Image: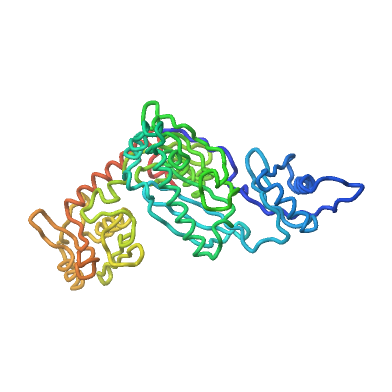
Amino acid sequence: MKNIKLSGKSPGSPLVRLVRITTSPPSLEDNTGDADRLKSGLLSQLKGHDHAYIPQAVLGRVASSFRRAGFKGFCLVNMLPDRVEIVDFLAAAPGKLPAVALDLGTTHLEATLLDLVTGRKLARAHAENDQLRFGCDILTRIHFSRQDTRQQDRGGTTGLARLRDAVVSSINGLVADLAASAGVRPDHIRAMTVSGNTTMVHFFLGLDPYHICREPYIPMVNSPDPCHAHELGLDIAALAPVWILPGIGSYFGGDLVSGILATGLDAAEETCMLIDVGTNAEVVLGNRDWLIACAGAAGPALEGGVARMGMRAGAGAIEQVAIDRDIWKLNCRTIGNVPARGICGSGLIDLVAELYLAGIIDFRGKFQRPREVESRALDVFLQERLIGRDNGYEFIVVPAAEGAAGRAVVLSQTDLDAMMRSKAAMYAILTTLVGQVGVAFDDLR
């Protein structure tokens, strides 16, 4: 459990900006160098900044572009914490200024390509994290990262290097898909923000996560400094800034901070709760005056570890379930709108909630046939869906004729019991948190 104080870059501050520059041309009376003239013109437009920096790798190109444009046009600037960095000069404003927002998940990567000029979403895509082949969970990967350390001295590849290569390759593939979908070149993408848990950030940066899972659980870094894309092997503009959202501790990373900022929890007047259920569950409680958080294991139970037909959120996973109790019809949606192969966490929660509201599950979490069947439609629904077996009832979510490979998707009493235990563990996290600060669930907005 941890008290949280957010600090760092303001959410409203742009990471990359286009700044219009107009300067007088050089003359015998004004012999200022081209690059120096550009920096002076830029700083006159940016209040509160007294130094601009041009990386040596692009100094010649930027100065030449400035002169060719007649000493006026648009300066492309990285707004970094310690400096203003000029990375390009354009005679005319580009139609788009693409940037990527990346969710660096343990199992999946999710990314959105944004236009920084208009704020419009250009494309969105997801991909599996290729690190899965080295382990499905964080602890397994941390142990793998320690392998092959002796080989390193003999020119071999460490486990940590293989993990980093895997995730960078996955990111580059995802970026290529986004760029193709939006009709832009990957090397025209000018910035990237990365949101991930502390361990995933360590893997991404090639940092040893060994001490994250050992008392006193201290990471190598909580708040990484921004770096350039080429330093990480990313296939976007070489000098595109990569901003990794800061973490709070070993088990509260930038993904949690992202959730707080995205929901506005840190600015809320009334007390609210944020619950992020992934491979781990992080819960934040508070408002603009205070925030407190705790974490616990939860996600694996919903990503295939509870229900026999459980699966990760991928193509064919049922992610949404609704029962129309007027005509007694079950509707479900799968990821990718393809035949159902199983059910993921969000679908499982939906399904159990709908069955409870329909009276097919009682308050103990047990299947039951309603004592009074109020309509012919309900009777048919129960006959087709709620099947008695030797070990109890099971509910048919998708019949075999409609499922992938002719396989039905079902929820058994055993599955339901396991989910109830998972729910109880999650509830324990929530009650521990609210009890710590003397807040009741009824007090939450």
In this view, 328 is above or below 111: below
Residue 392 drawn at (x, y percent): 11, 55
Front in this rendered view, residue 254 or 152: 152
Q: How many labels does the image show?
A: 0
- Would residue 421 appear left or right of 7 to someone viewing this image? left
Q: Which residue lies furthest to the right in this view?
A: 29
Residue 196 drawn at (x, y percent): 45, 44
Q: Can residue 98 be seen in this view?
A: yes
Residue appearing at x 54%, y 50% in the figure: 192
Quarter of the image with the N terminus in it = top left
Residue appearing at x 23%, y 66% in the figure: 403
In this view, 242 is above or below 438: below
What colour scheme does the image use? rainbow
Front in this rendered view, residue 339 or 321: 339
Q: Which residue lies furthest to the top in this view?
A: 216
Front in this rendered view, residue 227 or 13: 227
Among the 4 quarters of the image, the one containing residue 125? bottom left
Q: Which residue lies furthest to the front in this view?
A: 154
Residue 21 drawn at (x, y percent): 76, 54
Residue 355 drawn at (x, y percent): 24, 59
Among the 4 quarters of the image, the one containing residue 120? bottom right
Residue appearing at x 42%, y 57% in the figure: 126
In this view, 244 is above or below 405: above
Q: Is residue 431 visible?
A: no
Front in this rendered view, residue 126 or 171: 171
- Would residue 67 appear left or right of 141 to someone viewing this image? right
- Would residue 54 appear left or right of 364 to someone viewing this image? right
In this view, 6 is above or below 129: above
Among the 4 quarters of the image, the one containing residue 89? bottom right
